[in-house]
Image (spheres, rainbow, N blue to C red):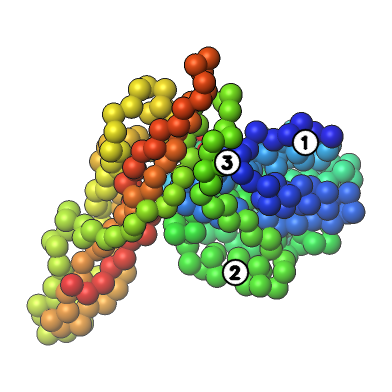
Amino acid sequence: MSEAPALAGRREEIAALTRAVESLYAGRGTVLEVAGDPGIGKTALLNLLARLAAERGATVLRARARSGEAKPYQVFRDAWKRAAPPTAGLRPPAAGAGPPWDTASDHELVRALLDGCARRDGGRGSVLVLDDLHHADPASARLVEALAEECAARPLVLAFALRPRQTPPALLAALDAASHTGHLLRVEPAPLDATAIASLADCGSTAIVASEGKKWEEQADDLPKCQRNSGDTVLQVNRTITYTVSVKVNASLTADLSAALKAAVGTELNTTMTKSYGLTTSLNPGQSIGLYIEYQTNVHAITTTSSAGQTTQLVNVTAPTGVVTARSC
Ligand SMILES: Nc1ncnc2c1ncn2[C@@H]1O[C@H](COP(=O)(O)OP(=O)(O)OP(=O)(O)O)[C@@H](O)[C@H]1O
Ligand SMILES: [Mg+2]
């Protein structure tokens, strides 16, 4: 048996992870989506899944999608690059000597991935863990969908985490469809309750979302506030717009606490960042549009354990949610 996982307040989620790992024994797989906002604990759950699977002798392949990544299938390439032996079984017969990622069809890649997993894990099952899938390039997103259809019939767990608000709508729709047909198990960790927060112990400083606060929108002011079509024909707008967003913390923190909070929020604190947004729309004569950035203030609990005992500090963090909308103004 494995030791108790050091995750507070996640009994149901851990039960779902455990069931997914145990399905491997029966020669079956699972598609497991961990969905939620920044800092809610998605990666922590994937870490636990990877550990449980490795303890049970399954082969674990891991990678995270990276923002702005252009290469097709990047998250899969990364997962396979890190696995040993490299690229074993990955070459589809028809792909020739070149790397299959650049030449094979999605269908061939799915076959090659499944064969590669089966060869590598010697029948004990494989777990493919993909984090931050909201950043996935379109080819990776397609491959996730295609691979998901294959998991039920073989010992393969496909587990991934994403921030729904930042996930391309087409991928979200495909995953929703899979969850409605029972092909995908969705885990949506909620903010930890007070008991769970209080139970955090002996892990240095840990910041988690204790409660989700209000959401609102701010108009991006890097643009002309309202772009207006003052001509008399329809104006096609197709460009990348950069705008700034800021993350604000309402307290001054020690280096230790701010490092824990930074890890949870995923960015520098009290900072302004430049982001970009691809705007494609058409404006009728006289119509104006502006860009609206959604913000949210969450209460984060930063818990520290020291020889003096355990303390929890609550801090408000205001940060963009990743949702940007262009609409009439
Ligand atoms: N249940 C928990 N018990 C204790 N600590 C936790 C728990 N869940 C998350 N944490 C801690 O909270 C912090 C944020 O969690 P995590 O990185 O998993 O969030 P996330 O949802 O992956 O965020 P992001 O969307 O930014 O990647 C981490 O330091 C993590 O170790
Ligand atoms: Mg994460």
Q: Secondary structure at mark 2?
A: helix
Task: Determine whether 59 is above or below 37 in the image.
Answer: above
Disc 3 within 8 angstroms of ligand 1 (CB): yes
Q: Secondary structure at mark 1?
A: helix
* Nearest to the observer: residue 104 or residue 39: 39
Q: Position of residue 222 (x, y in %)?
A: 17, 54
Dot 1 surroundings within 10 Å: few (below 14), some, or many (20 or more)?
some
Label 1 vs 3, first from the N-terminus? 1
Calculate the distance from the C-alpha at mark 3 to the C-alpha at mark 2. Answer: 29 Å
Dot 2 surroundings within 10 Å: few (below 14), some, or many (20 or more)?
some
Q: Residue at x 63, y 56 (%)?
A: 187
Q: Residue at x 76, y 47 (%)?
A: 18
Q: Which residue is mark 3?
A: 196
Q: Residue at x 37, y 59 (%)?
A: 323
Calculate the distance from the C-alpha at mark 1 to the C-alpha at mark 3. Answer: 26 Å
Amino acid on which disc 2 is placed: Asp
Q: Position of residue 53 (x, y in %)?
A: 77, 40
Q: Which mark is residue 176?
A: 2
Amino acid on which disc 3 is placed: Ala
Q: Nearer the viewer, mark 3 or mark 2?
A: 3
* Nearest to the observer: residue 190 or residue 61: 190
Task: Determine whether 297 is above or below 121 in the image.
Answer: below
Q: Which residue is mark 1?
A: 54
Label 3 vs 2, first from the N-terminus? 2
Q: Position of residue 285 (x, y in %)?
A: 15, 83
